[in-house]
Amino acid sequence: MQLYTALAGSLELMAKNVVDAMNATGVKRLIWISSMGIYDEVPGQRYSSILDPYRNSAEIIEASDLDYTILRPGWFTNKDEIDYEITQKGEPFKGHDISRKSLADLIVKLAVTP
């Protein structure tokens, strides 16, 4: 069993509550949507404190013992395409825009493939 989140609002509190609830129920797999730039991984860009809730919620998840994937999409488009690249934490960001269709494709793959 796993959990997929796409939340807005008090992300830090939500991340803590999600981690606590998952630990209490024994659910170990989490797919968490965040934002590009939380690790200062976008070449030539420095994002202000607007990303702090995304950074802080990612830190809460990373400090947990969950099996997690933190997605860091860029700007969403409505293009009818599936085209994306995966980067790991610490690697430079390779793109900026992503179609909603691409993001959905990745989420489904993550949800059905360990």
Image (cartoon, grey):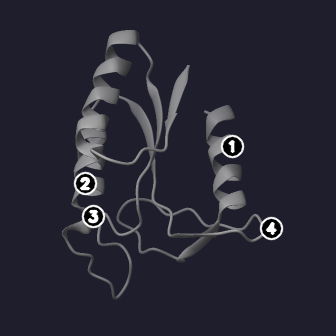
Give the residue at the far top of this rendering: 25
Identify the secondary structure beneath mark 3. helix
- Crowding at mark 3 (Cα within 10 Å: few <14, some 14-19, many 20+): some
Residue 88 drawn at (x, y percent): 45, 59
Disc 1 residue type (three-letter):
Lys
Q: Label 2 near label 4: C-beta < 8 Å? A: no
- Crowding at mark 1 (Cα within 10 Å: few <14, some 14-19, many 20+): few
Disc 3 residue type (three-letter):
Leu
Identify the secondary structure beneath mark 1. helix
Q: Label 3 near label 2: C-beta < 8 Å? A: yes
Q: Name the residue under label 1.
A: 109
First of labels 4, 2 by sequence position: 2
Q: Mark 3 points at which residue?
A: 51
Residue 31 lies, with reference to residue 92, above or below; the image says above
Q: Which residue is drawn at 68% across and 33% down?
A: 112
Disc 2 residue type (three-letter):
Pro
Residue 31 lies, with reference to residue 23, above or below; the image says below
How far is mark 3 from mark 4, CA to CA?
Answer: 28 Å
Q: Name the residue under label 4.
A: 80
Q: Name the residue under label 2.
A: 53
Give the residue at the far right of this rendering: 80
Residue 72 drawn at (x, y percent): 45, 59
Q: Which of marks 1 and 2 is in front?
A: 2
